[in-house]
Image: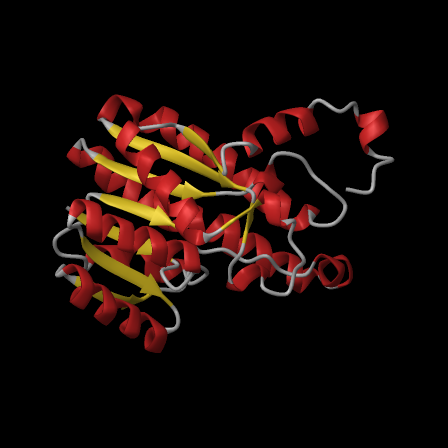
Amino acid sequence: MYLLVLGANSDVAQAVARKFAKEEHAGLYLASRDMELLQKTAQDIRIRHQVEAVPLPFDATDYDSHSGFYRLLDPKPDGVVVAFGCLGDQEKAQKDFREVRRIIETNYLGAVSILEVIAADFERRGHGFIIGISSVAGDRGRRGNYVYGSSKGALTVYLSGLRNRLASRNVQVTTVIPGFIRSKMTQNMELPRALSAEPEDVSEDIFRAYRKRKNIVYTKWFWKWIMAALKHIPESVFKRLNI
C-alpha cells in the first residue's frame, strides 16, 4: 500500500502517517511546503518503521501545480489523507478580505482542487480511499470562527458529495470531524482539557474508521453528541449565546 499524506507537517498528519506505517507497513508520500521539516519526519519514519517515506513539495493553493504533482507519483497511491488547513484570524478576516481568501482557499479550494485530480484516478481504477479532515466548526457557524467554520462546512458537504459519486466505484470517502486538538495550530489557545485530544488520539480514530470503512467519524467520539445538541438549539436562542 502507498498512502499520500497532504499537509504532512501537521501534528495529526504525522501521527496518521506513523500509524499507517506501523499497522499497514504502508509506503508514504509525505507532502507539504516546509521541506526541511518534512525530510526529518520522513527519515525518522524510514528508520523506525522500515518503510519507504518520500518527502514531496506541495502547496494547497498552487492549484495549477496539482495535476502535475499527482501525475509524477509512481506508483500511484492507494489512499490519500487531506490534513492541511488554515485556522486563520477571525478578527483580521472581518477587516481584511485577504485573510478570508487565505482561509477559504486553503481549507476548501485547495482540497477540492487536488481531490478532483485524485478522485478521477481512483474512479478510473475502481479502488482507493480518501480521508478528509474537516472540523466541528463546520457543523454550525459561531461568531468566534465563522470564516474558518464556513470553509470546513463547505469541505464536509463536498466530501459527502464525493462519497456519493465514488461509492459505486469501490472508493471509500471518510469525513473526519475533530473537535479540539492540542497541536501546533492551537498552541496559543486555551483549550478545555476534558474536551481536547492529542494528535495520536485522532490518528487512532482515523485508522479505526479506515479499517471499518466509515463514512463519517467524530473525534473524540463525544463530539458527535455535543454537535448534535448544538445544531438543535433554535436560531432565536443560538444568536444570543456567546459560544
Residue 137 sits above or below residue 127 on the image: below
The answer to whether 123 is drawn above or below residue 145 in the figure is above
Q: Residue at x 39, y 59 (%)?
A: 7
In depth, the one of 81 and 164 nearer the eye is: 81
Q: Quadrant of residue 136?
A: top right
Residue 5 coordinates in the image, percent (x, y): 31, 54
Q: Please state the horizontal and vertical placement of residue 74, each as a whole percent of the image.
A: 13, 56
Q: Is residue 159 left or right of residue 167?
A: right
Residue drawn at 74 percent across, 49 percent down: 144
For image coordinates 38% across by 24% down, the residue present is 164
The answer to which of 101 and 132 lies nearer the viewer is 132
Residue 18, by quadrant, is bottom left
Q: Residue furthest front?
A: 194
Outermost bottom residue: 36
In this rendering, position of residue 179 left or right of residue 235 = left
Give residue 117's position: percent from left, percent from top: 31, 46
| Viewer-closest of 143 and 103 | 143
Q: Is residue 138 above or below residue 187?
A: above
Q: In this rendering, does residue 148 appear at all?
A: yes
Q: Quadrant of residue 143?
A: top right
- Residue 124: x percent and y percent? 19, 35
Look at 43% across and 49% down and name the residue there.
Answer: 111
Pick whichever, 48 or 24, lies toward us. 48
> Which quadrant is home to the C terminus?
top right
